[in-house]
Amino acid sequence: MTLKNTVFWAFMLSFFLLTPDTAYAMHIMEGFLPAKWCLLWFVLSVPFIILGLISIQKNINKNPQIKMLLGLAGAFAFVLSALKIPSVTGSCSHPTGVGLGAILFGPVTMSVLGCIVLVFQALLLAHGGLTTLGANTFSMAVVGPFVSYGIFKLVKGLGGPRWLAVFLAASLGDLLTYVTTSFQLALAFPAETGGVMASLTKFMGIFALTQVPLAISEGLLTVLIFNLLTVYSSNELKSLYLLSEEEKYEYNN
């Protein structure tokens, strides 16, 4: 089975197995945040979306062959972030899938792809919401990709192996998305005793048991997908400066 077919069937399987669910989740649900916080997070997210659109247009003009990889990064994020795992107190956790796109194209490109994913999930799966789109975009499509990209560059800059850089980038991008969501909820709903910090501890505790193993699993899966790309999309990775000519020859022979 080709990589393209694998992604297609994973997408279809997830689409038909997942049912609409408005339970409180790592995607903040429709109507859950007060209006002022919805507006704040929307305003903070807009600049990253604008920069991402510019970046995507520039990359496509320079390397038209990367369109398939852009689609793959979006599909990967859609499938993973739609896989909701039940947590405590009626909530749920899920992977994010943003690390792969951030590594391939940079964080602002993934901000656009992540926002598109969140729109479709809100409309098709009742996962998240339109009023909370700004908050969910900021946590999953801004903070997550920037953390992933920064970790990847840091580990590679320190001479670490690529697999470790990819693993840590995807795992920590997932975890920092969850921490950001907890912080957003804590700001909107501070505890009567202890304020924001007490509320932050509570919200982080809700997700911790399921999110940590999910982050590790996402890191391992992202390493697997990236390794497949080095075999089936070596030309595209070389054009993105993620694969040298020597490495391309090694993987293709």
Image: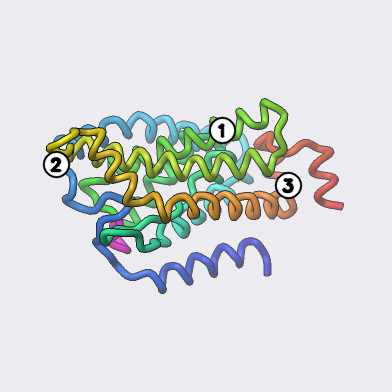
Q: Vertical placement of 189 versus 18: above or below?
A: above
Residue drawn 43% across and 51% down?
211
Q: Which residue is mark 2?
A: 34
Q: CA distance from mark 3 to mark 2?
A: 47 Å
Instruction: Decide: few, some or many residues near mark 3? Use Cα within 10 Å; few <14, some 14-19, many ≥20.
Output: many
Amino acid type at mark 1: Ile
> In this picture, which residue range is highlighted in magenta?
122-127
Mark 3 or 1, closer to the camera: 1
Q: Which residue is mark 1?
A: 151
- Judging depth in this view, the residue of 181 and 82 nearest the camera is 181
Asked if residue 26 is among those painted magenta in the image, a careful observer would answer no
Marker disc for residue 234: 3
Amino acid type at mark 3: Ser
- Judging depth in this view, the residue of 227 and 106 nearest the camera is 227
Instruction: Decide: few, some or many residues near mark 1? Use Cα within 10 Å; few <14, some 14-19, many ≥20.
Output: many
For mark 2, give the secondary structure: loop
Q: Position of residue 187 (x, y in %)?
A: 22, 35
Asked if residue 125 is among those painted magenta in the image, a careful observer would answer yes
Instruction: Decide: few, some or many residues near mark 2? Use Cα within 10 Å; few <14, some 14-19, many ≥20.
Output: few
| Image quadrant in which you'd find residue 45 | top left
Q: Position of residue 30 (x, y in %)?
A: 21, 53
Amino acid type at mark 2: Pro
* Image coloring type: rainbow
